[in-house]
Image: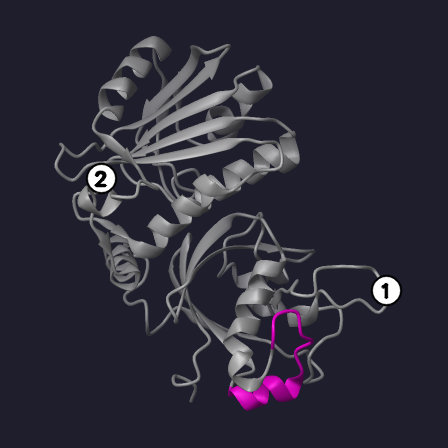
Amino acid sequence: MLYHKSFKETVLLSPIKEGATSLKIISGYASPAMASWHLMTIDDDMKKQVDISLVLGMLQDGIGKGTHEEFVQLVNKENKNNSKFKCSYVSQNSTPVHSKLYIWEKDEEPFKAFMGSANYSQIAFSSARREILCDCDPKEALKYYSSIEKDTIFCNHNEIEEYVTIKNQREMLEKLGQESGIVKSAIDENQVKLPLLTNKGDVGYGSGINWGYRRDGRKRNLNQAYIKIPSHIAKSRFFPPNKQHFSVLTDDGHQLILRVQQQGDKAITTPHNNSLLGEYLRNRLITVGVSNGDFVTKQNLLDYGRTDITFEKIDDEHFYMNFSVVDKE
């Protein structure tokens, strides 16, 4: 059968309901945001344990440092239901692999397989792209996977840089944006500024950067935070909807996986741990005396020099986040 629209459920989730317990993927390109969303959906929504093994095939030009580090973090992450994520790269000394193949196993035997044009990315599995996938012989698919796997190296191997070039992430993202045709530049148009202050011009208590502080006495990690999205920006769909995950490169070289959530798509959070965003922002504010877990005041932000954060869109899965003082007008 040929699938050409709305096949995310069919290819990535339905086999789990039929008893499949592992998924092997070959993808020319892939995004950590997709893997993050997939694992979280399996853990939180389906309450299942699934092992995912991903092979990236088109790395002859290298991989961005931030993207590489995100894949490593997902490999090292312990998921709630003990699902395991493995990620391997086809060595730059081997023939590049542009194939897209999804093989499900059940009772340690090949169960279902799909092949076609869709990379393992949220863009490819959304209405933003026209892609096709079709059923194929799972046993033959597994043989092909095994023939490719022998030319790969785990992304968290100690000597990974001897096999794959790790490149400057900003340059890789700008190249991606230019090739996609979605944006002309990663640094001019197609950007928004999100406020860190409330509509009344102050920081929130129990909201925003201070989400972890609760007046009702509920114990929460004090670093928990979200960035508010004004309603007109939420309605514009600047950020991906439906709790899709997206990767963010920060101006100081860090990489975060974020998503939009809450009613009305009004907040940006770090999905796997709500405190990661607040911890990151407090580390930026250390220059004005803010420590890990501290309540952030309006004066702290004024002393630092910014009360907003700029997001620049590369594509629907990749953004650049600027909280630097130098670039503030």
| Residue highlighted by disc 1 | 217
Q: Nearer the viewer, mark 1 or mark 2?
A: 1
Is 225 left, or right, of 288 in this rendering? right
Label placed on residue 146: none
Residue drawn at x 25%, y 43% as measured from the top left: 159
Q: Position of residue 252 (x, y in %)?
A: 39, 71
Query: Is residue 265 placed above or below 201 in the rendered structure?
Result: above
Q: Quadrant of residue 56?
A: top left
Q: Which structural element holds mark 1? A: loop
Query: Is residue 43 placed above or below 221 in the rendered structure?
Result: above
Judged from this view, the residue extending furthest toward the front is 158
The answer, for residue 324, to whether it is visible in the render is yes
Residue drawn at x 34%, y 9% as measured from the top left: 139
Q: Position of residue 308 (x, y in %)?
A: 54, 78
Is 115 left, or right, of 304 in this rendering? left
The amino acid on which the numbered mark 2 sits, given as a three-letter code, is: Met
Query: Is residue 30 placed above or below 311 in the rendered structure?
Result: above
Label located before the other in sequence (1 or 2): 2
The amino acid on which the numbered mark 1 sits, given as a three-letter code, is: Gly
- In the image, the segment drawn in magenta is 291-305
Query: Is residue 222 placed above or below 10 in the rendered structure?
Result: below
How would you rate the neighbour count of disc 1 (Cα within 10 Å): few for under 14, some for 14-19, many for 20 or more? few
Label placed on residue 58: 2
Is 15 or 60 nearer to us in this picture? 60
